[in-house]
Amino acid sequence: MKRIALPTACAFALILVLLGSPAPAVDRTLVILHTNDFHGHPLKFTYNGIPDAGGLPAMATLVNQVRAEHKNVLLLDAGDVNTGRAESNLFKAVPDILGFNYLGYDAMTLGNHEFDNPIEILRKQERLARFPFLSANIRTSEGDRLVRPYLMKRFEGFTVGILGLTLKETKGIAYPDHVKHLVFEDEVKTARRLVPLLRDKADIVVALAHLGIWDHETRGSKRLAAKVQGIDLIIDGHTHTDLTEPVYVNGTPIVQAFQWGLKIGKATITVRDGRMAGFRWESVPVNLKERLRLADGTETLRYVGERYDEDPFLLSALTPYADRVESLLSEVIGNAEAPFSNENTRKQESEIGNLVADSMLWSTRSLKTDFALQNGGGIRVGLPAGEITKKKIYEILPFDNTVVVLKMKGRQVLRLFDHMAAVPAGSGAFPQVSEGVRFTIDAAARKSEGVTINGRPINPDRIYAMATNSYLAGGGDGYKILLEALDRYDTSVFQRDALTEYIAIVKNRLKPEVEGRICVVQSIKSFKEVSEVVTPAQAGVQKHTEGLDSRLRGNDKKNRFSTTCEFINGDPLAFSILPVSDSLPQILVSSHGCCPIRRIPAH
């Protein structure tokens, strides 16, 4: 018998062991880049007063860098590509979709703002896109799916299933005519039906959802994570949430990447043995900058994160859309019969303030908004008499604020009006309100009185809907109370677009009016007393408004007054008028020519 050498025997034995053992697990890396709530920002823009933020050409450079570093990359969008800047809106998001094609997006979920346009426009956008639109829970009234429910994406060694979901509330917040033939099914019920199917086919299951991250697990993507098993990652949109780390519910990470292409989310997933074995996430700024104050008191700008050059080819392809917009802004949309002054917008009711606030109320009428609030400082110029061009609207409202609807209890609304009354005259935070609102600001007491909306006092227990701009809704200009709102919905309609449509469709020929929405008064304690009884003419009381004139035209007995007046820099700020009677006298106080006149018991 031939003997086998020991080294040979050992090698043979090792081979047998290896053949009988499973192969070691191989780790594979998947990188998912994602955006949400892009809202028509194809080119760089000014954000928070700082220019050159975002834009698809800079995003392209970032995406290409990641693709150069990683083999397996997905690029996804969680919805609301539509409704934003003029270079997108005027072309029905064509430049955005062309840019998405260039970047190589793999899929996009439908957001509620995809229904700002008729279905025919959505179909044209779908044909233009070189990537699928997804939503598993939207059907036509005939029962057919509107778009693909999911996408299977295969990589070397693993497969990713991407499920599209759109918030079911879209039916109630989109333009009614655009969704009247659509059915929006419950997202959780849809996911429970389809996730097991995807799990059978895919190693990684991603929900590409436009649901929103809310405070409670009874709503949005948190509800989805809490109620549905088998989802590895939820990439979300709708609430424009600026996360610094994932939100975890039931062990499932939920991520969002702010808005407008200002940030790109980057999820890095380790795939091992057919499952997600590792996960990390970051939000990458796209040419965002911050202001820094130097030791010498001057300011400089610093990039938040890396600076990305703009892709020259994409920039040249998209620039003509912006050039075309510039030429289109010369369009005349209406006519002003007289000037709308901006001189006093930061200290009293003004014609231009009324116009801007009314446009927000009109823009959100389908959401049953009760009133609207605008900060005076957000209105930069007045409106001259004559033709009104779109360019003039951009000058009046130069900030990229959107219209936001907040829901608040009546007691919160009363606190809000007290806050408004405490704003010093001359501050940019001074309020302008929509038609139907009446209230008095007691400037000395810094309190509001007599608040009514559509002729009715505020009911502390009723829920009111208020439209405002996104700056105030985020607590800007000291309006932190608005952060306490029970609910908020960003319509993503720019304020200037709301004003443009309001003028073009509703008002066309504008007549400036001050209606007595805000009456600013001084406490009687702040006046210098004058005790003699005089006539209005002797007191030098000027005509303020029709409301005051009618009170001055009484019979001889009532037409006798004791007056006091406070002066600032030689100009009368307010008058108090004391009717002479045998009963307890009442003080009528007026300021800045506003009316109706309020009665205050005399001291």
Image: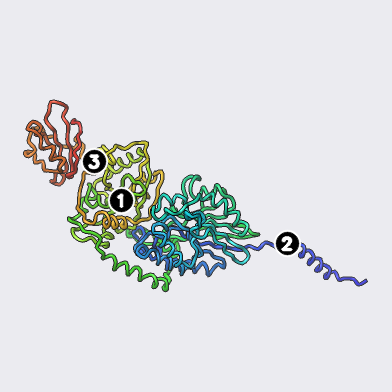
Q: Amino acid at mark 2?
A: Pro
- Judged from the image, the secondary structure of the residue bearing numbered disc 1 is helix
Query: Which residue position holds label 3?
Result: 443
Please tell me in which quadrant of the rendered image residue 202 appears.
Answer: bottom right
Q: Secondary structure at mark 3?
A: loop
Left of 576 or right of it: where is 52?
right
Q: Which mark is residue 22?
A: 2
> Which numbered disc flags the more N-terminal residue, 3 or 1?
1
Q: Residues within 10 Å of mark 1 (few under 14, many from 20)?
A: many
Specify the quadrant that holds the N terminus. bottom right
Amino acid at circle 3: Ala
* Residue 552 position by quadrant: top left
Q: CA distance from mark 1 to mark 2?
A: 68 Å
Q: Quadrant of residue 328?
A: bottom left
How far from the left and from the top, in percent, is residue 127? 45, 66
Residue 434, how many percent across, how many down?
27, 47
Give the image location of residue 536, x and y in percent.
9, 38
Image mark for residue 362: 1
Q: CA distance from mark 3 to mark 1?
A: 30 Å
Q: Are marks 1 and 2 in contact (CB under 8 Å)?
A: no
**Would residue 270 be seen by someone viewing this image from the given angle?**
yes
Say whether marks 3 and 1 touch (CB < 8 Å): no
